Image (cartoon, coloured by chain):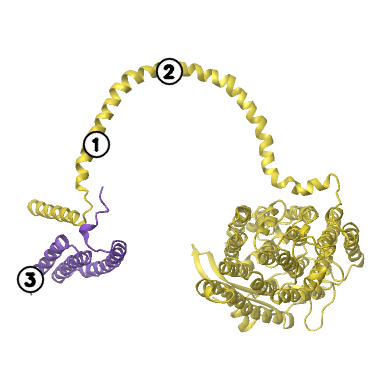
């Protein structure tokens, strides 16, 4: 397999993630898009690692790291979403402009 | 890590046999852990139960009492135990090791038994006393910690764990004294207790560090051996270290002048007072002194005279205060302070067993008196003896147990207090503290005097409160009986020179202490001294009865004893509580006035001249430099910032996705820049 194939898949995933992040209005889907971007990065890391093969497997370690952080992030993110939904009966980001000046 | 203390003591020429206690001693640590388990169970599951979780507290101490009793009996019958289990938890460098664990020797077994037995009785009593009260759940949780921390303290094989338990006891007492925190006074009482103890704790911690670092080991066993072996490094710090440790003990054991927290600590519920004054908290200081006894006996002899002096002041002067208190719990509190003075004096003078035996007997009858007082308070809904009187008819069980406790405290033969107090008197006489011995005899008179007053005002005469008082429920009176029995009989465990067949006596049970201590304990009854002590007590009772006896009906008549100078002094507690403020006020006033004069006429002149000069200069600086130059610049800056802010804040829309878009655009721009540049 060529490295470039992996990179194409991951950039496609990343772009999808960015698209979803900017366009979707539902917070849950925005969070999912963020996950998509993180996983694109993971694919990149693993792909490069398989080429470079560093002694201490830095790429793979980082991928695991990213997965861990992503899990934590989703945990907190969904908790926030839940609280927002309970308070405002909506998960639409357009209606959430509390953080305005 | 398991290590056994191999060195055995020889006591008066005869070798004492030390066992290691086997399985029971190996698992004795369960006693130290159970109350904390109970604490968690109470917090999580307590509210669903009938007594709000008090069941767990009682259960923990009941199981602990099994261990304590088995060890106590083994210690009595099968030779003295000497055993300790420790786990290393940390290490500084290679020599100083911190360990946790538990010790099983005569002294700690005695304390295990005391804490578990008195604790259990008080807990059972509290089930009845606290029923329907507020926050019963939290109360029992804190109460469990209180007993648990005390067990950690007395089981400690080294100074570090002792400090941990010490602070735990302090924390729990703070929580319990302030249990009714809706009333600001109670909160203040809790704070006062905590702060006073904290002041003393500094002494304890410094002292512990000093003696521990001197020999590179915090173990009591190592410290004792070093002290007996006249270790030079330890000898160099012994005096200061000893006094610092004593200062720590003064706080917890309420020695003059750090006793001020104890009477205020009556703000807590009565079971707390009972446990605090009998088995936990206040005995901690005496226990510390007993644990460090070899240090004082062999190296820090110079410190002892101060300790004896403090103890003597405490036992007499604070005892007098009990004569004027109207709150029945305060009477008992002052009496506790006074009895602690006895113990401290004894231990300081070299009477290891004498002090500890008094601690042992005192725990039972003082807990009994407090629980009795609690029962009375429960019935009349007031702490004040002016609202009581004549309760003998209404509360027979409380009445006779309270009288038993009072007689034991007063030291009437053959109740327990007589034997232990007599032993202290004998020790003081033998060690050459004759003046202190006479003070102690006078103290016995005072003790009997104020206890007679308390009994007379509470149980005799006519009832002066409201409503119809009634005897407390069985859950509360049974514990009273359970404490009255040891109060009567436990004094017989240590009659000088008498060894009960098969079990020996109290002195022997406490005899293995790693190394020989060379303390004094009487070999035979000194009848002259015993008669003097007993005579003083009987005189106190007789005189007290004449003044406060049954035939006087009204309160004015009963409290008619007014010695002109002494009484105002006592009422104001020797002005000790005012003293801090008073000293500050008296010295600061004149000082402040003289400073004020100098200020007005000397300094002000200089300042005014300088001021005029400065003003001229200031006018110039202000008018020309500041107003035009600096202000112009600053105003200009603020206008710029204002404009920039007005423009930029439009970006702050609060729309998350817009931010994300900015972010993405920024990332793309950066990526392009990097690609072009690199």
Q: Colour of chain A?
A: purple
Q: Are marks 2 and 3 on the same chain?
A: no
Mark toward the viewer: 2 or 3: 2
For mark 2, give the secondary structure.
Answer: helix
Q: Which chain is yellow?
A: B
Q: Looking at the rendered structure, which numbered label has been put on residue B615?
A: 2
Number of other residues with Cα within 10 Å of mark 3, as a class: few under 14, some 14 to 19, many 20 or more:
few
* Residue B3 visible in the snapshot: no
Give the chain letter at badge 3: A
**B89 to A95, vertically: above or below:** below
> Is B345 situated left or right of B618 in this image?
right
Tell me what residue is drawn at x 79 percent, y 46 percent: B569
Location of mark 1 (residue): B642
Using the numbered discs, state the Cα–Cα distance from disc 3 to disc 1 in whole angstroms.
Answer: 52 Å
- Quadrant location of residue B564? top right
Q: Looking at the rendered structure, which numbered label has been put on residue A5?
A: 3
Using the numbered discs, state the Cα–Cα distance from disc 2 to disc 3 in whole angstroms.
Answer: 81 Å
Mark toward the viewer: 3 or 1: 1
Number of other residues with Cα within 10 Å of mark 1, as a class: few under 14, some 14 to 19, many 20 or more:
few
Image quadrant occupied by the N terminus of chain B: bottom right
């Amino acid at each position: 397999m060529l490295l470039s194939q992996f990179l194409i898949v991951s950039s496609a995933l990343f772009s999808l993630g960015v698209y979803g992040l900017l366009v979707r209005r539902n917070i849950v889907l925005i969070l999912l898009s963020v996950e998509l971007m993180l996983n694109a990065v993971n694919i990149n890391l693993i792909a490069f690692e398989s080429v470079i093969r560093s002694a201490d497997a830095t790429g793979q370690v980082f991928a695991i790291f990213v997965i861990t952080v992503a899990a934590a992030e989703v945990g907190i993110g969904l908790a926030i979403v839940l609280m927002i939904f309970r308070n405002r009966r909506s998960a639409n980001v357009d209606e959430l402009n509390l953080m305005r000046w | 890590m398991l290590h056994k203390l191999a060195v055995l003591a020889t006591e008066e020429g005869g070798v004492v046999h030390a066992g290691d206690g086997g399985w029971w001693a190996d698992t004795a640590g369960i006693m130290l852990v159970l109350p904390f388990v109970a604490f968690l169970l109470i917090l999580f599951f307590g509210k669903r139960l009938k007594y709000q979780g008090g069941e767990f507290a009682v259960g923990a101490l009941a199981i602990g009492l099994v261990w304590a009793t088995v060890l106590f009996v083994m210690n009595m019958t099968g030779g003295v135990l000497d055993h300790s289990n420790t786990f290393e938890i940390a290490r500084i460098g290679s020599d100083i090791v911190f360990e946790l664990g538990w010790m099983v020797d005569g002294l700690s077994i005695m304390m295990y038994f005391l804490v578990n037995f008195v604790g259990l009785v008080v807990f059972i009593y509290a089930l009845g006393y606290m029923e329907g009260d507020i926050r019963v759940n939290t109360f029992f949780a804190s109460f469990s910690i209180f007993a648990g921390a005390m067990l950690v303290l007395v089981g400690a094989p080294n100074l570090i764990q002792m400090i941990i338990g010490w602070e735990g006891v302090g924390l729990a007492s703070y929580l319990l004294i302030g249990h009714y925190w809706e009333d600001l006074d109670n909160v203040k009482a809790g704070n006062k207790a905590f702060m006073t103890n904290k002041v003393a704790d500094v002494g304890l911690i410094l002292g512990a560090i000093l003696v521990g670092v001197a020999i590179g080991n915090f173990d009591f066993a190592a410290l004792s051996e070093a002290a007996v072996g006249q270790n030079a490094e330890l000898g160099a710090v012994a005096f200061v270290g000893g006094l610092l440790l004593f200062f720590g003990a003064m706080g917890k054991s309420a020695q003059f002048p750090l006793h001020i927290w104890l009477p205020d600590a009556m703000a807590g519920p009565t079971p707390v007072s009972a446990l605090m004054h009998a088995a936990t908290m206040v005995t901690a200081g005496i226990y510390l002194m007993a644990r460090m006894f070899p240090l004082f006996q062999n190296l820090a002899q110079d410190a002892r005279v101060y300790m004896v002096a403090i103890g003597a002041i405490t036992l007499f002067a604070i005892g007098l205060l009990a004569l004027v208190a109207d709150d029945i719990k305060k009477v008992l509190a002052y009496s506790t302070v006074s009895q602690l003075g006895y113990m401290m004096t004894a231990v300081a003078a070299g009477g290891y067993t004498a002090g500890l035996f008094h601690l042992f007997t005192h725990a039972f009858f003082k807990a009994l008196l407090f629980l009795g007082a609690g029962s009375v308070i429960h019935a009349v809904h007031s702490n004040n003896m002016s609202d009581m009187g004549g309760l003998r008819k209404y509360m027979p069980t409380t009445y006779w147990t309270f009288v038993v406790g009072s007689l034991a405290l007063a030291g009437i033969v053959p109740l327990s207090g007589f034997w232990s107090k007599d032993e202290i008197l004998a020790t003081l006489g033998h060690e050459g503290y004759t003046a202190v011995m006479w003070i102690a005899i006078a103290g016995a008179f005072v003790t009997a005097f104020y206890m007679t007053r308390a009994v007379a005002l509470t149980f005799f005469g006519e009832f002066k409160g409201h409503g119809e008082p009634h005897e407390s429920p069985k859950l509360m009176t049974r514990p009273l009986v359970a404490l009255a029995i040891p109060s009567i009989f436990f004094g017989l465990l240590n009659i000088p020179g008498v060894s009960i067949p098969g079990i020996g006596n109290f002195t022997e049970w406490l005899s293995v202490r790693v190394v020989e201590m060379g303390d004094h304990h009487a070999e035979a009854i000194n009848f002259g001294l015993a008669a003097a002590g007993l005579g003083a007590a009987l005189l106190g009772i007789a005189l007290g009865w004449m003044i406060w006896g049954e035939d006087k009906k009204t309160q004015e008549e009963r409290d008619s004893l007014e010695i002109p100078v002494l009484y105002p002094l006592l009422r104001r507690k020797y002005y000790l509580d005012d003293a801090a403020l008073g000293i500050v006020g008296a010295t600061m006033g004149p000082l402040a006035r003289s400073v004020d004069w100098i200020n007005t006429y000397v300094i002000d002149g200089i300042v005014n001249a300088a001021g005029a000069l400065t003003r001229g200069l200031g006018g110039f600086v202000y008018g020309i430099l500041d107003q035009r130059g600096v202000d112009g610049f600053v105003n200009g800056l603020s206008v710029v910032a204002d404009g920039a802010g007005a423009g930029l804040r439009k970006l702050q829309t609060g729309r998350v996705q817009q931010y994300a878009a900015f972010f993405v655009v920024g990332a793309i721009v950066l990526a392009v820049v990097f690609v072009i540049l690199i």
